[in-house]
Image (spheres, rainbow, N blue to C red):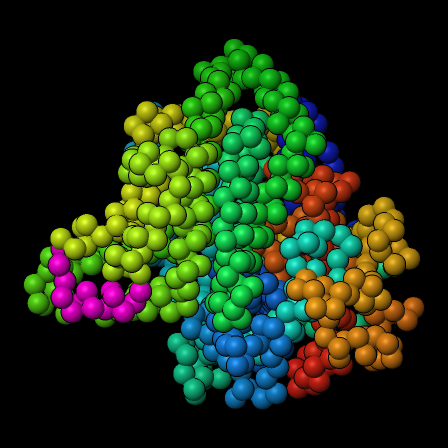
Amino acid sequence: MKKLWMCLLLITTSFAAFADEGMWFLMYLKRLNEADMQKKGLRLSAEEIYSINHSSLKDAIVQFGGGCTAEIVSDQGLVFTNHHCGYGAIAELSTPENDHLTNGFWAKTKSEELKPKSLSVRFFVRMDDVSKRILGLVNNKMTEDERNKIIAAEIAKIQKENSENGKYVVEVKSFYQGNEYYYFVYQDYNDVRLVGTPPNSIGKFGGDTDNWEWPRHTGDFSIFRVYADRNGNPAEYAQDNVPLKPKHFLPVSLKGIQEGDFAMILGYPGRTNRWMPSGGINQNVKFAYPAWVEASKTGMDAMKKFMDQDQAVKLNYASKYSQVANYWKNRQGMIDALTLHKTAASKAKDEVKFDKWANKAANKAEYGDVIKIINAYYTATNEKARHDNYLMGMIRSSAIATLPYTIGSGLEVYAAGDEARRKDILPRLKSAIDAGYEKMYLPLEEQVLIDELNLYAKKAGNIAPYVAELAAKNNNDFTAYIKESVKNSIFASAERLNNYLENPNAEILTNDPLYKLSSALISKYRQEDPSLKVEQDKFDGAYRKYVAGVLASNPKGKFYPDANSTLRLSYGSIKGLPQDPRNDADKNFYTTLKGTVAKYKKGDEEFDLPQRLMDLYKNKDYGRYADKKGYLPVNFLSDNDITGGNSGSPVINGNGELIGLAFDGNIEAMAGDVIFDHKLQRTISVDIRYVLFIIDKFAGATNIIDELKIVE
């Protein structure tokens, strides 16, 4: 079986057959993928990967923290994921006195493991197709609102039917732009504790400079443990909870890898848009992404100035800064890659061919105006996309752009309520205030908001009317206004808000300058233009028909749906890139500790290294984790198809053994969420041998090594 390039078949352009492309449903592996995977080196059956009635590989794969992937690696619920996936939890558990983010952390006993406030893992139980059930209730004569209402009602029924009275979480998701529907059954475990993490100088080695780049030398891993009640059921944190006994866990291979070896990845890819029309690509490249990049960089620069001055501030904002920085570089890479490869122009040619097919007599009634409607929508929304990304950049970077509105809406109810009503909602308000202000540093927040507002007012176009009024008065410089507002606002600190709870006054809240500003920003973000609502509804219907037309034109085609945070499998092989003089390895599919040390810059935030690691390298003290050629492997490349959300996913060999943790893609193929480049697109992973070397030889955490099932 050959995998198919996600372009238009026959009607437009031929699908290219590349074994490395595709994010596949586990329930269809037997029919679509098993034979091809086994031909390429898989020694397992589809049933051993995905089984409803028996333990299988899927039982060892979890969604981690809602946005990453992780894998169970011991019979005591031990979890491996990326360092950047555990980053927020590690930062939360760190203080200047016990700085686990900077110095690392290794629990030598289970009693030493640390519980973040809120961290969960999600196990996948089963899935099924409910397309006929849902789509049988709707038709093309319905408005989009009517259609969505009927579908939402049926989804609610499906969720209730399969939740077993709340035991499971059930999600129903659409695929192929609403042409198919599947439900997914999950079980969530909320007691997840930190077991180990390397210091930042290993876990984030290379920083923003190396992010999305190859060659890479990053020890991007962290270790957690899942706990359950004594019967193995999910339970909130309690001291008498016990390590989870999983249905399956992954053995760990020290046998090493060679170019051409089979490799598969199971994980929760977040979002791809490989059906995206040319107008959407143009909109992103010319309007949305440039605004995203500029707004993100503005927030980053303001944050970093204060983070560099105070270690406590640095720890408190480390996770937010890292998230903003990651997508800042990603979106710039997308702009560059999509522009270089002329992806929009290529898709436009495909759409011209589709339009000719769509306007043939047999197809015209159903598909004839699809491309016209799609193009009209993007023309109508280009400027809005620019505006919204400038605004979202502010919302992502600035807490005091959103917190006054979020908490203030509750304060409105509180101020207007009688004594009983106030007593009822007071605990929730106090909790929201504590969470929002616990690690806030007001000077940083003040500067971020000033810089973001200045940028928004100058560049975003159709800005919020209240912000436009202020900008006209202050000549687009919000410095004095924000500083004065902070002085006079009850939202400047938790103390002021708690004082307000003691003496609520609706007039004070209504006239609060930060509340007025925040309300204006959020209202603008949520604003619906009636004319654009009409265009949106027409677009949704046309996009759905566009994809349906492609599927209908080739009923025997083997397609994979766009990623949408559901469990998928991709497979391919260990595969390098053309030789690169920056890489000391003899073949450019792996990197070594020698290359890591070559990048070392003493005292540099991105390229410093612990002396312990330098000594191990100097003495070539690699233990059993060295490759048979003598070097210590660090990272490697494969041609697996992944995207955001796959971070932390296991890279698994043909025997079902763990060989690495996926953590990144390469910047040369940054257009991969829109179009797969089989020549350039690669997954960057940390070699499991480097992970175990750091745990064992660097940290001396042999208790963790002893838990693993190691295959040598």
In the picture, residue 583 is in which quadrant? Answer: bottom right
Magenta stretch, residue numbers: 493-506
Question: Is 614 on the left or on the right of 671, as rendered?
Answer: right
Q: Residue furthest left?
A: 418
Q: Is residue 520 left or right of residue 176?
A: left
Q: Is residue 517 left or right of residue 572?
A: left
Q: Foreground residue, 507 or 570?
A: 507
Q: Quadrant of residue 586?
A: bottom right
Q: In the rendered view, tell whether residue 577 sits above or below residue 237.
A: above
The reply to whether the magenta stretch includes residue 478 is no
Asked if residue 495 is among those painted magenta in the image, a careful observer would answer: yes
Viewer-proximal residue, 108 or 200?
Answer: 200
- The correct choice, above or below, for 439 with respect to 507 in the image is below
Taking depth in this image into account, of 132 and 201 the one nearest to the observer is 201
Magenta portion: prevailing SS class: helix
Residue at 44% in and 59% down: 444
Seen from the viewer's position, the closer of residues 444 and 689 is 444
Name the quarter where the C terminus is drawn.
bottom right
Q: Is residue 130 visible?
A: no
Q: Is residue 417 visible?
A: yes
Q: Quadrant of the N terminus?
A: top right
Residue depicted at 61% across the width and 22% down the height: 348
x, y percent for residue 33? 68, 48
In the depicted structure, whether residue 155 falls above or below residue 100: above
Estimate the x, y position of residue 543 in percent, counting from the top left: 48, 29
Residue at x-position 62% and y-position 18%? 353
Residue 690, position as x, y percentages in the image? 75, 70
Location of residue 552 in the rendering, given as x and y in whole percent from the top left corner: 55, 28
Residue at screen point 47% across, 22% down:
379
